[in-house]
Image (spheres, rainbow, N blue to C red):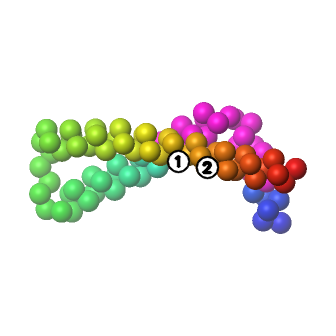
Amino acid sequence: MEKNSKFERWTEERKKGMLNYVAKSTLYLGILLIIGRIIGYLVSGNAQFNGDFFAELSLNIAVIVIVSGFINSVIWYVKEFKYRNSL
């Protein structure tokens, strides 16, 4: 039953395309990581939103987009491989 529902979800997801999957997954992960970064900065006690903070945040965003984009692309191919083998 569980395998069948995963199969159906992936069937629907793959209809939208790889670019949509990678962009959506990267966006979700990026938002969560940025929110966590900001909360961690606020909790640390030295919450001064100056130029250094925003420069570091923009670098973090760039790294998140590149790394999670690559990781989500690999995940797409793994899921696609499993999908095609189960047909």
Q: What element carries label 1?
A: helix
Residue name at image x 70 percent, y 50 percent: 79
CA gap, disc 1 and disc 2: 6 Å
Q: Residue furthest right?
A: 87
Q: Which of 72 and 30 is in front in this view?
A: 72
The residue identified by callout 2 is 75
- Residue 6 sits in quarter: bottom right
Residue 24 in sight: no
Q: Is the magenta stretch mostly helix, strand or loop?
A: helix
* Residue 23 to residue 8: above or below: above
Does residue 25 belong to the magenta stretch? Answer: yes
The residue identified by callout 1 is 71
x then y, percent, for residue 2: 78, 65
Residue 66 in sight: yes
- Residue 17 sits in quarter: top right
Which kind of residue does numbered mark 1 sit on? Answer: Ile
Which kind of residue does numbered mark 2 sit on? Answer: Ile
